[in-house]
Amino acid sequence: MTKMKLMSALTAAVVFLAGCAPPHSRAVHPAEAVGVGVGYVAVSPILILKGLAEGIAATPYFLEADTREMNQVMVRSGARVDLDRTYRYAYGAGLEQSLAERGRGRVFREMRSATQHFQKVLRGYGVRNAREFHLTAVRSADQYGYTLYAVVYRPAGRINVQAATGEAVTLTKRNTGFYRPYELDARGRPLDLVLDWAAVPRTAIGTQKGQALLMTIAANSVLINRRSDEFWDAARRWRAGEFREITAGRRTAMAGRLQ
């Protein structure tokens, strides 16, 4: 399915769901969110498919939404991804079992583990070259509670890049540094292709639910062949200390698109 066809299908599904949303559902505009922590509000199921189409930056807006309802919306609309399958592929247990465990399931705490889980999810969704997609992070603002995530396509399992000291270093999948995004290799040649990215408070991705949402939306970005070339400018600004500005700007832009 092409990206244009998927967007058309999502739009049609959103219109349909708007007419059948239960009376108790309340669509709260994301711009009402406040705070430095998660700082996002629950969203109406009407917005779920819009968020799915927007990419992983929408993940925090879904944290307070009903997980079962979200899954039903995805399945009913014919989306190529849904939460139940992501849970099964990543953790070996479906959505209902995971909910029964009340969030006591596994969570990843570093990007090597995150990528391993993500690649399992991609294989489950039929991506043959799943090992060439990685979840990466710029972690220079972790101490302040913010992380910059990027979904990248990188066929090489061994890379030669420039370290912060200016020296060329060789990294493999066993090295922590392998799971950072790299625009260029040590010889100045293009390396990573960024499909999707998000600037979020760390608390938004600290639970199994948050991580399952991230992987579900990230898998959708792979399946629809998304591109996010603007990431590299954001990454440079992030490393220069503008992480709060980037997070706020991304949140404002997302709020405008999810209304």
Image: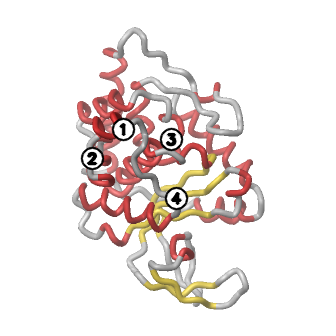
To which residue does mark 2 refer? 93
Taking depth in this image into account, of 36 and 257 the one nearest to the observer is 36
Front disc: 1 or 3 = 1
Q: Secondary structure at mark 1?
A: loop
Position of residue 153 in the picture relative to residue 74 (left or right): right
- Amino acid at dot 2: Ala
Front disc: 2 or 1 = 1
- Measuring from the top left, give residue 67's x and y in whole percent: 38, 32
What is the tally of numbered marks visible in this picture? 4
Disc 2/disc 4 C-alpha distance (Å): 19 Å
- Measuring from the top left, give residue 38's x and y in whole percent: 62, 38
Q: Earlier in the sequence, mark 2 or mark 1?
A: 2
In the rendered view, would you say 101 is above or below 109?
Answer: above
Q: Earlier in the sequence, mark 1 or mark 3?
A: 3
In the rendered view, would you say 209 is above or below 77?
Answer: below
Q: Earlier in the sequence, mark 4 or mark 1?
A: 1
Front disc: 4 or 1 = 1
**Circles 2, 1 touching at the beta carbon (< 8 Å):** yes
Q: Earlier in the sequence, mark 3 or mark 2?
A: 3
To which residue does mark 1 refer? 101
- Amino acid at dot 4: Arg
Numbered circle sitting on residue 212: none
Disc 3/disc 4 C-alpha distance (Å): 21 Å
Numbered circle sitting on residue 58: 3
To which residue does mark 4 refer? 109
Position of residue 161 in the picture relative to residue 74 (left or right): right
